[in-house]
């Protein structure tokens, strides 16, 4: 490879899209994809290390994660209202939490000098860093949001049944009740179409959940990376440090928000709104839940 002259212009700009680092048979390998792979590798290695060193008398690492898991379970119980639901949903929520958290933190590591150069117009080169937070790529956050929303509806089908889950969005039961109740309750002619329309709004709301989850996470993480890059340009030494600690906290908070919203969506999907609220909170709430 020929050396690049010292006078060559090198461009380095923050882009909304993930930048390709390499290509394998026409498939682009972007820097956000690499970061996501690294995040998964960190989670796998950490899990294997914890499993290998699991003891009745926990060491420091095991004790730390036991405290984290116990705190997470107690927090999840406040959302779901039931340890039974928490036990089924928590593995998904905690997995999303750690994946998002590690991605957020990998993206702010001070490794900006590590990357590749791609030829650009005018004899200049574009610098592409190896690491860019996977959550700063809308494709990653969109995929996570789709998993959370579709997964919650599948969970609802397993808990309350496919008909009741379908009826939340396409309320055929409300329209069918018109013929049965119209003589005794004429107001059903107004109420039933409204209930059917509300169900359609719920369906639109599911799509809105995907947009809300994905754009919130993407916007916060991407804005943080741009902020750090801007502060580094103004003054490379000292000035970015307070903002770096701020982004560490933002990364933690955003991972927690995403995981908590996932818990909320799963909890809502498991509720049977046709039954009385008191009955739902007690014995009948989870009678259809698989063991």
Image (spheres, grey):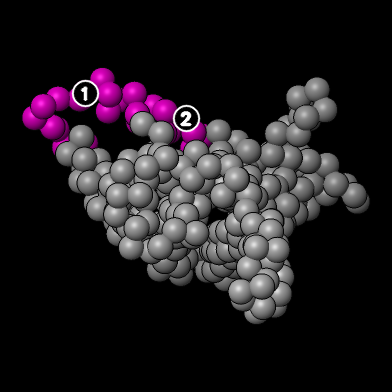
CB atoms of marks 1 and 2 within 8 Å: no
Q: Residues within 10 Å of mark 2 (few under 14, many from 20)?
A: few
Of residue 214 and residue 230, the one placed in the foreground of this image is 214
Mark 1, residue position:
53
Foreground residue among 121 and 288:
288
Residue that extends furthest to the left in the rendered view of this protein: 57
Query: Quadrant of the image for the N terminus?
Result: top right
Quarter of the picture containing the C terminus is top left
245 displayed left or right of 183: left
Q: Is residue 248 left or right of residue 182?
A: left
Q: Name the residue at 37% across, 51% down.
A: 285
Task: Residue 280: give its label.
Answer: none
Q: Residue at x 44, y 58 (%)?
A: 275
Q: Which segment did they paint magenta?
A: 38-61
Q: Specify whether residue 97 is painted magenta.
A: no
Give me the disc on residue 41: 2
Instruction: Inspect the magenta stretch and tell me whether residue 44 lies in it.
Output: yes
Could you say where residue 238 lies in the image, as x and y percent from the top left?
A: 42, 66
- First along the sequence among labels 1 and 2: 2
Can residue 258 be spotted in the picture?
no
């Amino acid at each position: 490879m020929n050396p690049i002259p010292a006078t060559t212009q090198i461009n380095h700009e923050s882009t909304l899209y993930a930048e390709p680092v390499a290509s394998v048979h026409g498939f682009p390998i972007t820097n956000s994809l690499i970061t996501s792979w690294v995040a998964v590798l960190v989670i796998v290695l950490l899990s294997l290390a914890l499993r290998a060193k699991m003891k009745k008398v926990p060491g420091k690492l095991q004790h730390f994660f036991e405290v984290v898991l116990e705190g997470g379970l107690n927090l999840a119980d406040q959302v779901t209202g039931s340890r039974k639901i928490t036990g089924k949903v928590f593995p998904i929520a905690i997995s999303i939490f750690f994946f998002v958290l590690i991605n957020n933190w990998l993206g702010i590591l001070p490794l900006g000098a590590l990357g590749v150069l791609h030829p650009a117009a005018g004899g200049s080169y574009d610098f592409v860093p190896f690491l860019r937070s996977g959550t700063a790529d809308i494709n990653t956050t969109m995929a996570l949001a789709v998993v959370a929303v579709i997964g919650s509806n599948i969970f609802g089908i397993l808990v309350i049944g496919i008909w009741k889950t379908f009826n939340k969005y396409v309320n055929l039961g409300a329209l069918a009740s018109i013929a049965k109740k119209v003589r005794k309750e004429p107001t059903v002619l107004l109420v039933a179409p409204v209930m059917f329309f509300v169900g359609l709004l719920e369906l639109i709301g599911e799509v809105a959940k995907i947009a809300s989850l994905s754009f919130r996470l993407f916007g916060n993480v991407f804005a943080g990376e741009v902020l750090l890059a801007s502060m580094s340009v103004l003054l490379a030494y000292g000035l970015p440090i307070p903002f770096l600690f701020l982004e560490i906290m933002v990364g933690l908070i955003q991972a927690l928000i995403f995981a908590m919203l996932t818990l909320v969506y799963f909890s809502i999907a498991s509720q049977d709104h046709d039954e009385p609220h008191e009955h739902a909170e007690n014995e009948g709430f989870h009678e259809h839940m698989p063991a």
